[in-house]
Amino acid sequence: QVQLEESGGGSVQAGGSLRLSCAVSTYISSTNYLGWFRQSPGKEREGVAAIYIGAGSTVYADSVKGRFTISRDNAKNTVYLQMNSLKPEDTAMYYCAAGSPTPWGQLNPRYFTYWGQGTQVTVSS
């Protein structure tokens, strides 16, 4: 059974940094993207960043461009999200996921099949 396990969440002050990790238990042949998503209470889950497993190309939500960086280590089956210059509005539960999105849906949760349990990120002002 495929498992994705996030780690690295926590509490930080505005302007600080956190690095999230997501370990994937096994190679998922039916997927070609790994992504990070977030959800805060009362809001829909939104895509933050995604990376093409093969070539490593990336896509980011406008709200995090220039502050967040997604990367992967294929040998370790691990994807990372480096988050810098954090803002209170970044507070959310962060999830990693694996899927095969369409070219226009790389940040759309509906195209991602396998999900982790999430890790909480809290940014205080």
Image (tube, grey):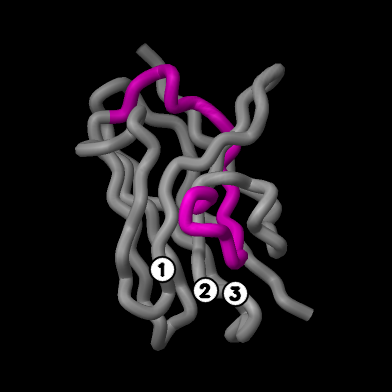
Circle 1 residue? 52
Q: From this view, report whether residue 3 is shown above or below residue 82.
A: below
Regarding mark 3 in the picture, which secondary structure is present there? Answer: loop
Residue 57, given in percent of the width and then of the height, sits at 31, 65
Q: As shown in the figure, which amino acid type bears the numbered disc 3? A: Thr
Amino acid type of the residue that numbered disc 2 sits on in the rendered structure = Asn
Magenta stretch: residue 74 in it? no
Q: Quadrant of the C terminus?
A: top left
- Which comes before the other along the chain, label 2 or label 1? 2
Crowding at dot 2, Cα within 10 Å, few <14 / some 14-19 / many 20+, comes out as some
Q: Amino acid at mark 1?
A: Tyr
Dot 2: what SS?
A: loop
CA gap between label 2 and label 3 equals 4 Å
At x 30%, y 21%, the residue is 14
Q: Is residue 91 magenta?
A: yes
Q: Which residue is mark 2?
A: 32
The residue segment tinted magenta is: 86-106
CB-based contact (under 8 Å), mark 2 and mark 1:
yes
Where in the figure is residue 97, as x and y percent of width and height?
A: 60, 59
Left or right: 106 in relation to 39: left
Mark 2 and mark 1: Cα distance apart in space? 6 Å
Say if 69 sits above or below 13 in the image: below
Disc with the residue nearer the chain's start (3 vs 1): 3
Q: Is residue 20 above or below residue 14?
A: below
User: Dot 1: what SS?
Assistant: strand
- Could you say where residue 42 lies in the image, as x and y percent from the top left? 70, 17
